[in-house]
Amino acid sequence: MSSHQSRAMVWPYDKFKKEIQSKLSAAEIHDPATITLPPYYVDTPAVRRTQARFYDCVTVMDKQVGSILRELKEDGLADDTIVFFYSDHGSGMPRHKRALLDSGMKVAMMVHVPQKWQHLVKATPGSTSNRLINFADFAPTVLSILNIDIPQYMEGQPFLGPKETTAHNYLVGHRDRVDEVIDMARSVRSQDLLYIRNFMPHLSYNQPTSWPDRGEIRHEFYKAANGKLTAPQAHFIGPTRKSEELYDCVKDPMNLNNLALQENYQGKLREMRDVLKAQVIANKDLGFLPEAMQCELSKGSTPYDMARKNYGIAAIFDAANQVGTADEKHYLQNMKSKEAAVRFWGVMGLSASSTFSTNARTALGKALSDDYINVRIQAAHTLLKNGTSANSLSVLAKALTENNMAAVMHAARTIEMLGKKTASLLSAMQEAEKRMKIIHSPGTSALVVQAGRVDMAIFVGFSIKAFLDRFKK
């Protein structure tokens, strides 16, 4: 936890100094004035202080790892211990954690195999590899080292040991809701290229989010968003994203130059699109069903069991894949589908559009009465964003009272993001806050994952608090 987001950027600075920086000597503490900032960050004293703070956290973590290795040696276990060292994602700093860019998905990974056990692996000591690895590979790799049969249901590929196999050609990354922040994106990483498909391109990489927003660095980016930005800064801080992103990770490791529109990369772009669609369908990717809809469609069963059946994922993916790239007529056609998720993505297409016609406005008005609540909420969002409040506000207010907590989450986040356009829902949000505090006791830590409804109540509360705070004067 020493380099966790909490320590690196969220905790008050005094607490960081006491709990983390105090473990370093003066020579080990990083000077904010001399560090190099990545080009997607704005250069302010607070940003520099936080970046230096992160480096301090990593230094403490590194010393702690050294301590553990010394303990293994002192206990006589070092010669019998294979050590895997890795991170769970990019650092907790902005644009890293929660992003499908390489800064969020490419992590350090080292394996130390004692000389006594070198015969178990093909790799030679001190060697490096550019093999594509994901976390699903870890379990079969350990079984391979132990020469234990690998169950067929394991999707990973062992990368060490006698059962080592050929590497992945592609790895698929997923981004869905994190805490209260609703988003939807998928990525495909090959040896050299990274493809990202943003299915909600009208949302920023830098969405407001309660927990990270406790850190001062986040507010530096919000302030900078109103000023003049460089292209790398605008990519991260700007209000929207491109529907598709394609990067050459060898020439452009920070993912700053989007190649998706370049003519000489169109063949690679089509290849990555095809890989993504094939993986989504093969894996029965449930992320294309809004959460509240998942709950409704899997009643009496589980989402996992529902996914094993044919729930129309190909058609749903095609509808989602039109968002940000198709024209209005395709979205309107999708809104007429018998498949609820296709209708949802039709509405999402209009949400991502900068303008829409009278026909679209009429269709959205009808969608306020859709059988499925996610469709109703998204239609209300789209109409309110474009100045139409008739019936939209009542749809959102009613959604806050639903028993389906995923629907309440969708509604609360929608109201929060619309801000002043939903000011009349102040009392409805206050009532929802009371209900969330009954479901989730305020004395329970928000950092401990709770079961089902309790966990969701925490995140609903994040959105409600952010909304209500705007009216505290």
Image (tube, grey):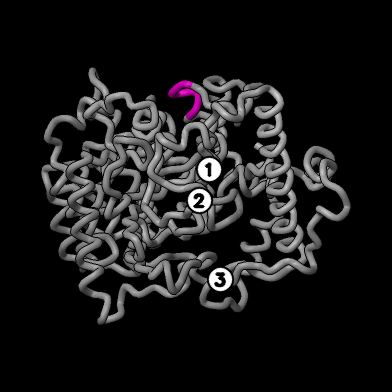
Element under disc 2: loop
Q: Earlier in the sequence, mark 3 or mark 1?
A: 1
Q: Amino acid at mark 2?
A: Val
15 left or right, relative to 229: right
Element under disc 3: helix
The residue that label 2 is drawn on is: 107
Mark 2 vs 1: CB contact within 8 A: yes
Element under disc 1: strand
The residues bearing labels 3 and 1 have C-alpha atoms spaced at a distance of 28 Å
Density class for disc 3 (Cα within 10 Å; few <14, some 14-19, many ≥20) is some
The stretch of residues the image draws in magenta is 451-455
Q: Is residue 414 visible?
A: no
| Foreground label between 3 and 1 | 1
The residue that label 3 is drawn on is: 233
- Quadrant location, the N terminus: top right
Q: Is residue 164 visible?
A: yes
Whole-percent x, y for residue 98 in the image: 49, 49
Whole-percent x, y for residue 468 in the image: 61, 43
The label number, if any, that marks residue 459 in the structure image:
none
As drawn, the residue found furthest toward the right would be 26
The residue that label 1 is drawn on is: 86
